[in-house]
Image (cartoon, rainbow, N blue to C red):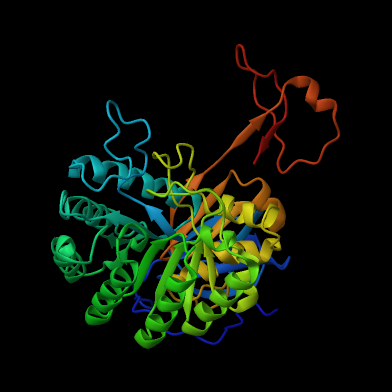
Amino acid sequence: MSADRKQPQPPEDGAATGAGATSLLLSHARLADGRAVDVRLVGDRIEAVGTAGSLGPVAGGARVDLTGHLLLPAPAEPHAHADTALSADSPGPAPYDGSYDVPCDGEEVQRRATEAALLQLGHGATALRAHVRIAAGRGLTSLDAVLRTRRSLHGLGELTPVAVPRLLTGVAGAEERALLQDAVRRGGVVAGGRPDGDPDPAGHLETVLTVAAEHGVPADLHTEGDDPVWLARLAAMAGELGAGVTIGPCAGLARLPSEVAGRAAERLAAAGVAVVCLPQGGCGEAGSRGVAPVGLLRAAGVRVAAGSGALRDAANPVGRGDPLEAAYLLASQGGLAPEEAYGAVSAEARAVLGLPEVRVEAGFPAELLAVRGERLAGVLSLAYSRIVVHRGRVVARTSAVREYCDSAAALDLPRQARTKRPPEPGGPQAGPVVRS
């Protein structure tokens, strides 16, 4: 491969490059296909990819040595819950247990939503879509808090909220219908819904898709997907809408007879409806367990992405919000190859969010994740040390060091890195240090 081979330019996404743009050289990285490369970033795009040692930084640009790291397109988070994140340990009665009726503290929601977004950014997710409840009892307080979080994260990552009402039909749903309209008018908000909690799920669906069409925004519905009649109605309406429609977590699809689920999957595929599964557990009010039938959906041609769902709230008090863990579970339990599993949290997740494709090739967006390791299977198994690149600059680093006592030095084991350090009182005595 020549040092400065250029690839065909993908569609531009409005990012500035060229004169005056910052530059960054990622040197001696390993790609998933085994190649060792240098990657030069200018502005928020990949400017060139060459064999390791062949590229230099633009004058005045920075360099990051990625020796020992696997360089991947950055993952994205297509289904988080920003308003309930990190609320499992809230003192007193659980105010964020999934209830739409309990008033909420906007400042507290913003604090937790920001902490959760930064945690997921540190894992590598440079783009997030977060479901946020709106309701007659709380108005848009939580949504406004998450919008403030989005502004505070500018330059670090992209956060898009989904406005999720509970009740949209009949006289009782009038206020929340108005709230949903108001929410999407604010800009940058996806039209959402939870049809399973409405007495008229089909009417709920129709309202959400109508609002999405009126405002030209995507629709994202939180559903178990266990009603084949409702799924058929969804597919018919989504096909007419002709815009991005996503549903998840759809664990209920796995509980349907296989022939019924297969027909539903074929209808969803024909209508272009994407499914976001949650391998790490249920989320939101449903608190369900199980995972959507990923193999069946993929075989039918449905675009399937994977998200993290609940992050340490009442539905999952131990959620990690780590896309690599979601990929690991799809590979270890879902039967996907490591490359397919990582694709579910990267390429497929970005497509669900309407984001441009990322490849480690010249001309593509500089949204990258470097993980210490040599092969994708190993990275999904054990990925502690990470470097996250958003819009062409390093926005997060995580470094892990594992220490062994002196007796471990006698073992002739492979190590990613091995150094000596002076002994510390009460600590391992001058043993090998392994960076993970």
Q: Is residue 422 left or right of residue 242?
A: right
Q: In this view, does 332 lie to the left or right of 305?
A: right
**Which residue is at the front of the view, 47 or 100?**
100
Q: How many labels does the image show?
A: 0
Residue 3 position (above or below residue 162): below
> Where residue 391 sits in the image (x, y, percent)?
41, 65
Name the image quarter holding residue 44.
Answer: bottom left
> Where residue 3 sits in the image (x, y, percent)?
64, 77
**Which residue is at the front of the view, 293 or 411?**
293
At 56% from the left and 52% from the top, the residue drawn is 290
**Which residue is at the front of the view, 32 or 38?**
32
Can you say which quadrant of the picture contains the N terminus? bottom right
Name the image quarter holding residue 294.
Answer: bottom right
Residue 226 position (above or below residue 360): above
At 27% from the left and 76% from the top, the residue drawn is 212
Q: Is residue 22 left or right of residue 181?
A: right
At 13% from the left and 61% from the top, the residue drawn is 175
> Where residue 259 sits in the image (x, y, percent)?
64, 72
Can you say which quadrant of the picture contains the C terminus? top right
Residue 178 position (above or below residue 284): below
**Which residue is at the front of the view, 105 or 197?**
197
At 59% from the left and 72% from the top, the residue drawn is 260
Residue 12 appears in view: no
> Where residue 20 sits in the image (x, y, percent)?
34, 72
Q: In this view, does 42 lie to the left or right of 98?
A: right
Name the image quarter holding residue 101.
Answer: top left
Residue 379 appears in view: yes
